[in-house]
């Protein structure tokens, strides 16, 4: 069976490499997390991470062209 650490490493690797196991609820948390991260970056006058923008369906290359009203 292996040591506790070996079992935990295997579980962590499996969780991070296969997002499909997380299912619908995991995807919702990913999207909400990306929205929070992007919002905090904009609020702090920083550019959001490209990965967060992609999760939200925003093209990272076009984001700098967005202007506030």
Image (spheres, grey):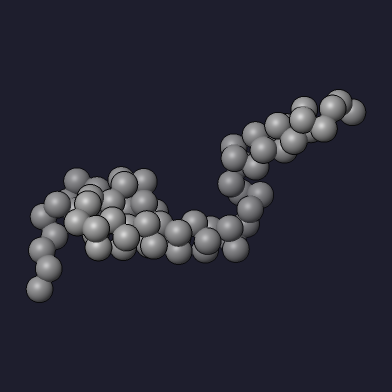
Tell me if I can see residue 57 in this picture. no
Q: Residue at x 58, y 58 (%)?
A: 26
Residue 15, position as x, y percentages in the image: 65, 42
In the image, taking residue 3 as reference, residue 25 lies left or right, namely left
In the image, taking residue 1 as reference, residue 49 lies left or right, namely left
Placement of the N terminus among the 4 image quadrants: top right
12 up-or-down from 39: above or below: above
Q: Residue at x 77, y 30 (%)?
A: 5
Q: Residue at x 22, y 52 (%)?
A: 46
Find residue 16 and report its image quarter.
top right
Residue 8, position as x, y percentages in the image: 74, 35
Q: Residue at x 49, y 56 (%)?
A: 30
Q: Between 24 and 4, which is closer to the camera in this rendering? A: 4
60 up-or-down from 11: above or below: below
Q: How many marks?
A: 0
Tell me if I can see residue 34 in this picture. yes
Q: Between 60 and 20, which is closer to the camera in this rendering? A: 60
Find residue 3 and report its image quarter.
top right
Placement of the C terminus among the 4 image quadrants: bottom left
Name the outermost residue toward the front. 44
In the image, taking residue 19 as reference, residue 8 lies left or right, namely right
In the image, taking residue 31 as reference, residue 38 lies left or right, namely left
12 up-or-down from 22: above or below: above
Name the outermost residue toward the right. 1
Residue 35, position as x, y percentages in the image: 38, 62
Q: Between 59 and 48, which is closer to the camera in this rendering? A: 48
């Amino acid at each position: 069976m292996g040591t506790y650490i070996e079992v935990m490493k295997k579980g962590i690797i499996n969780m991070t490499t296969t997002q499909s196991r997380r299912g619908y609820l995991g995807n919702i948390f990913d999207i909400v997390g990306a929205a929070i991260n992007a919002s905090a970056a904009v609020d702090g006058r920083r550019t959001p991470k490209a990965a967060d923008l992609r999760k939200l369906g925003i093209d990272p290359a076009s984001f700098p062209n967005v202007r506030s009203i």
